[in-house]
Amino acid sequence: LADLNRAQTALMRSEKLASLGKLISEVAHEISNPLMIVSCNAQLAQRPEIGPAESARLLGIIGDECQRAKAILKRLLRFAAPGQRQLRRVDPNAALEAVVALLENQLKWSHIDIRRAYAEQPPAVAVDEHQMQEVFMNLINNAREAMPGGGTLELATAVEGDRLRLDFRDTGGGIPEKDRKSIFEPFFTTKTDGTGLGLSVCYAIVKAHGGEINFESDPNVGTTFTIWLPVAKDDPLPAEP
Ligand code: ADP
Ligand code: MG
């Protein structure tokens, strides 16, 4: 059994290294695009014939591209070094509500109704609350972005055996067949201002917690992302502070 464990750890490490190599080359590419735009616009802005209005416009582009590169790096750091996980017993409904409270106004402005179908007194899950809230935030933001004309976001929690199931169900346009195998890949995005890192971060965090993440999508109905998380056992995990 110990041998099997060692073999599995080695395998996981080599898979991690392989995906890290892929990630690095993709990051280099993602960061070099905005850098190129910054450098071209900086050169343009130095030309003598450029007036103050045009130069202000070019500086605006430079600022936007710097922000974009910064956002990519920030998300990448979370992906590459998610930090020490602090597992605690967390009430899934309360953790979800904390994120909804942060995003509620944005959802309202986007004409999105929130429906809740929460399990009554669900068991605690053993998770790092901050990382899990990052997952919830990514999924809710994706749902919002999938419903530009408004819609309904349903949040559901349910006990399934020794796991807790969380559903994020939107009434957006769905995920086309051809994109379905790619959405968890880092930098896969169909949005002009997307980073494509949200779902890959969700995947990494949920897997690191021994959970699962999957989705179902129908262009006529919408998309549901589902997470399964292990229910906290009675071992001495610290309770929420
Ligand atoms: P980003 O949101 O920056 O594009 P993500 O990794 O969060 O990156 O998502 C990757 C892609 O998956 C999105 O660009 C979109 O095409 C698709 N996607 C994710 N969530 C949804 C959803 N709820 N409905 C439709 N498409 C989605
Ligand atoms: Mg996203």
Image (tube, rainbow, N blue to C red):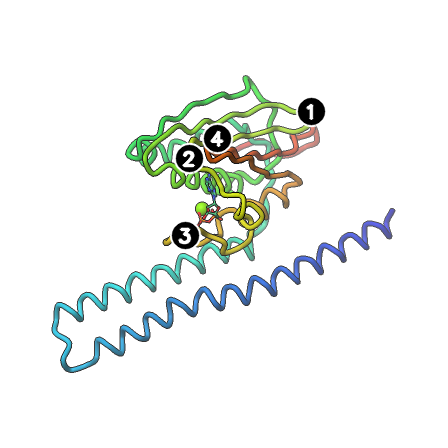
At mark 2, the secondary structure is loop
**Which mark identifies residue 169?**
4
Task: Identify which residue, 167 or 129, lies in the foreground.
Answer: 167
Where is mark 2, residue-wise? 172
What amino acid is at disc 2?
Gly
Q: Distance between the residues labelled 1 and 3?
A: 36 Å
Where is mark 3, residue-wise? 194
N-term mark: 4 or 1: 1
Residue 191 as seen in the image, left or right of residue 213: left
For label 4, count other residues whose C-alpha is less than 10 Å away and answer few (under 14), some (14-19) or many (20+).
many
Residue 129: x and y in percent read 53, 38
Q: Determine if the C-beta at disc 4 is less than 8 A from ligand 1.
A: no
Where is mark 1, residue-wise? 161
Mark 4 or mark 2, whichever is nearer to me: 2
What amino acid is at disc 1?
Gly
Task: Identify which residue, 114 or 132, lies in the foreground.
Answer: 114
Q: Determine if the C-beta at disc 2 is less than 8 A from ligand 1.
A: yes
What amino acid is at disc 4?
Arg
